Each structure stands twice: as structure tokens, then as C-alpha cells.
Amino acid sequence: ADFKQPLIVLATADEESSMRGAKALVSAGRPLARRALIGEPTGMRPVSMHKGMMIEKLTITGQSGHSSNPGLGRNAMETMQRILVHLLALRDRMRHQKHPGFEIDHPTLNLGCIRGGDNTNRICGHCFLAFEIRPLPGMDIDSLQRDLERSIAQLAAADRVGWQLERIIVPPFCSEPDSEMVALCEHLTGHSRGSVAFATEAPYLQELGMDVVVLGAGDIDVAHQPNEHLPLERIKPNIRFLSQLIGHCCL
């Protein structure tokens, strides 16, 4: 059939990490489209909102020295311990921020990786911590990031150590309450709209003016696993849905 409206198949780079491809599209102001479907394993349930993702990689740089005289150095691990206390307190405070649309109805903070030091008889000169925050839609993530960096700077200055923070930030997403795209996908799939805790390119496509929904076959619980898979019996229903969606939007 001849399309009355164009159909764009869009692939983006670094979707699993920095969202560099989606950010480049926003900078370029393209593509121009009215609606967007982002394929993710949602069990064919239309997703109208998701949490954001703030990946933080912090390095504390102190001064090594022989452990027999602590005054010879500045222990980076001790500063990191104080920062960890601050982060856990932040996590506890964020539990009071609620959104009823999510199964886990508050922001989460996960301490993912830590390493530092090289021997028991040396003052730890470097300590590294990787952690993530998953903020809710409506949260001011710029303010949250500024407060986080201000607290780290204050703790590091008090101990006279250096610090460096690498960050990757993906905003939360929430479709408009009257989203025609979400309503159409609810009608075609028979599933009501829902939410997920993982992040996608949705906020970037929304910034380009698109009515966005996240939807696809499969289960997120098997994603990023050694045996990541999509059962064969889920492929035909997905193809049928996509055909119907294209028919409504393009034909």
C-alpha cells in the first residue's frame, strides 16, 4: 500500500549507556515526526512513563604513604566512607518522594562498584565508586546533581583530597495524559498503560515534539542475561500489532 504519511525506522548509538545518538538527534533537531514507538521488552504493554538514570563514577585522590605514620598521607578510602554515609542518607530521604504510577514508587540509589588501595601497609591514595540514581518523573534532576556535587566537594575539601566525577544522565519520561499514541496502543494491544524503571530514548524524542510510547514484545527480566531471548510465539503477535499501528498512522 502507498503510505499517506512517512514511516521512519530510527536506530540510535549508545542506547545502553550515554544515549549519545539520541542526544545528537536533539542537537540536530531531527527527525521531524508526530509519533514515535520505542521498541523495548514491555510484554506488549504500552509504557507511558519511566524513571530517569543518573550514572555517577566518582574518584577520590588522596596521598599515599606508609601506614605506620598516618600523618604522611591522606586516606582516600576514609573520605569515600564519609561520602557513602551521605549517599545512604540521601537514599533514605528520597524514599519519601512517591509516585503511585510505579511498582517501586520512590527514587532508588544503588551502590554498584567500589575499589581502592593496594596494600594493608599503605595509606589508600585512590578510591573509586560507581553508583546510580533512578529519579522519578517530575523531579528536578539538575538540582539533584548540583546538590550531590556540592556535598562531595565539601567532604573532599574537609579532608584535603581531590575528586573527579564522571556522569551520564538520562531524564525521566512521562507522556501527556491525553497522548493519542498511548491510547491507540492501548486499543490495539488490549493492555492498559504502565510504567517501567529502566530508561530509554523517549525523553529525547519527546523533546523533538513527538508523541512517544515505549512498547514491545519480550520480558525485561531476561535482558542483559547470558540467555537473553524472545520466545518465537511472541513474534507473530508483535508483527500483527506493528502492522495495525502502521495502518492507523501511515495508511
Image: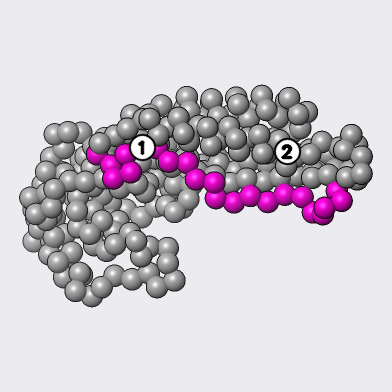
Front-most of 65 and 179? Answer: 65
Task: Using the image, tell me which numbered label, if any, was put on residue 106.
Answer: 1
Q: Quadrant of residue 75?
A: top right
Residue at 34% over, 61% down = 221
Front-most of 151 and 246? Answer: 151
Residue at 77% over, 50% down = 117
Task: Using the image, tell me which numbered label, if any, was put on residue 22.
Answer: none
Q: Amino acid at mark 2?
A: Glu
Task: Identify the mark nearer the N-term, 2 or 1.
Answer: 2
Front-most of 32 and 128? Answer: 128
Q: Amino acid at mark 1?
A: His
Instruction: Name the residue carrying label 2.
Output: 78
Residue 120 seen in render = yes
Residue at 47% over, 24% down = 143
| Residue 46 lies in the magenta stretch | no
> How far apart are labels 2 and 1 at the CA level?
30 Å
Dot 2: within a 10 Å radius of its alpha carbon, few (fewer than 14), some, or many (20 or more) residues? some
> What's the magenta region?
101-122
